[in-house]
Amino acid sequence: MRKDITIEKLTLGGEKLNKSAMARQYNCCWRTIDKRLNPDKYKKDKKTRIYKSMLDSYKNIIDEKIENNNIPATGIYFLLKTKYDFKGKYGIVNKYVSSKKENIISNLTIRFETIKGYQSQVDWKERLKLHDSKGNEYIVSVFLIVLGNSRYKYIELTFDQTQTTLFRCMTNAFKYFGGTTEEILFDNMKTIVDRAKSDFTDVVINSKAMQFSKDAGFKIVTCRPYRPRTKGKVETLAKIMNRLKAFDYEFYSSCELKEIVTKLNYELNNNEKSQGTNEIPINLFVKEKEYLKPVNYQLLENYSLPEKTYKVSNESMINYHGIKYSVPIKYVGKNITVIDENNVIHLYYNKDLIYSYKKNTNFKFNYKENDYIDILKRSSFNTQTEEQINNFINKNIHSLDCINIEREK
C-alpha cells in the first residue's frame, strides 16, 4: 500500500480534483487515487467462513447425555459409534465433552438468589493434617453450613466424620442460626445416603438421616452431577483451609485450635464481604433469620449421643446384648460401631457399613455364611478342603439350634 498518498495531500488546496493528473503525479493508477478519496466505495463485506464438524448432527445427543446423566466421553463415543453409526474418532468427542463440562462448571459459579430461609448447604472438608507447637499431629475436619440467601455461615472443627458428629454439628448450627431452612442441600456423603444416584438408580437416603431431618423440620436434597455447587461454599472452604494451614505448629492444644476456628467463623460472618453477594453476611442475616423455621432441640438430643462400639473377638464376632453376630475375619481385634434401629442392627467400621442383621433372639450365634466358612478355615477345620467344610455345614446347619446362618443373596 502506498503510504505517501494520503487524503490530506490529495485534497490540499480545495480545488476540483483531476484523478488522472494526480495518478501521473504519483506514478500510480487513477483507481488508487479514487480509493483514497472514496474509501467506502471500495469496502467489501467480509465473508465469515463456516467450519463444519462431524459432530454437528450429534451435539444435541451429547449435550443431553452430559447434562442429564454426566456420561463420560468414552461412554458417549461408544454410544455414537454403536447406535448412530458415528464415523469420527474418539479425540473430537472427548474434546467437545471436556469443553462442555468446563462451561457447565463455570456457569455454576454464577451467583443465584435463594429465597430467604428456603435453602442452606452443607459441606465437609476432610482430613487436614496439622501439628501443635510440640510436634503432635492432628487429623482434623471442618464442618460447614451456609445459608443460601445471606451467606451466613457456621463452621465447626471435628476429629471424625461419623453420622453422630454430623448430627451434632447440624444441631449446633441450628442453635447458632436460631432455626433451620426449609431444605438443606448435601453432597452425596455416606452419612446421608446409602446409595448415590446413578444412571439406573435414584438416591437412597439413610433411614436415620431421614428421621433426623423430619425431627429437625427440614427436607434433605442431594446434589446431581455438576449441580449445584455455588461459589459461596467453595470460596468459604478455601478461606478456612488456607488460614488453618497457617497455624501449623502455632497452637498448643486441640482446645486452642477449636477457638481459632470459632474466631474465624466470626470474621467470615461479621467483617468480610461474601464474593457471592458483595455484602457482609451478618447484614443480610438480620433479615433472613426471621424466615427460619424453629427447631425442637429436645427431639435431636438422642442423635448426638456417642455411638456404641464393640471389639471384634478372635472368633470374628461381636457380642451385642448377649447375642453374637459375625463380621468378616479382617475385622478381628478392631472396634465396630453398632447402630440399633427398631428390628435391625447395622454394623459399621468407621463410616463403612459392613452388615445389617435382623434382630433374632432365638439364636445366640448369628453368622453370615461366608464368615462361617472363613472362621472354620482358621479353626481346627483348617486342614480340611473347602468341599469338606461345605459338607460339614450342610450336615450340621439344621442340628445346631443355637446357630443361625444367613446365606448371602
Image (cartoon, grey):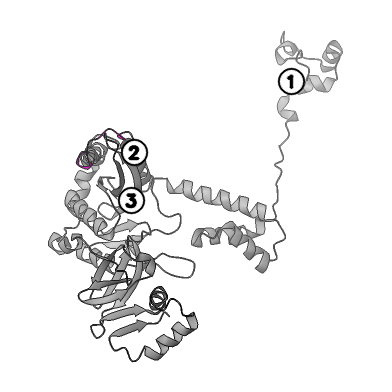
> Does residue 9 appear anywhere in the picture?
yes
What residue is drawn where x is 54% and y is 60%?
71
Q: Categorize mark 3 by other alpha carbons within 10 Å: few (<14), some (14-19), many (20+).
A: some
Q: Secondary structure at mark 3?
A: strand
> Which residue lies under the disc numbered 1?
37
Picture quadrant of residue 339:
bottom left
Q: Residue furthest top?
A: 13
Residue type at numbered disc 2: Lys
> Which residue lies under the disc numbered 2?
239
Side of 245 relative to 18 (left or right): left
Picture quadrant of residue 376:
bottom left
Q: CA distance from mark 3 to mark 1?
A: 70 Å
Mark 2–mark 1 CB contact (< 8 Å) = no
Residue sitting nearer the eye, 10 or 143? 143
> Which residue lies under the disc numbered 3?
124
Mark 3–mark 1 CB contact (< 8 Å) = no
Chief secondary structure of the magenta portion = loop
Q: Position of residue 33 (x, y in %)?
A: 79, 19
Q: Is residue 8 above or below residue 317?
A: above
> Does residue 113 appear anywhere in the picture?
no
Q: Is residue 262 above or below residue 6?
A: below
Q: Secondary structure at mark 2?
A: helix
Magenta residue span: 247-256
Q: Residue furthest left?
A: 298
Residue type at numbered disc 3: Trp
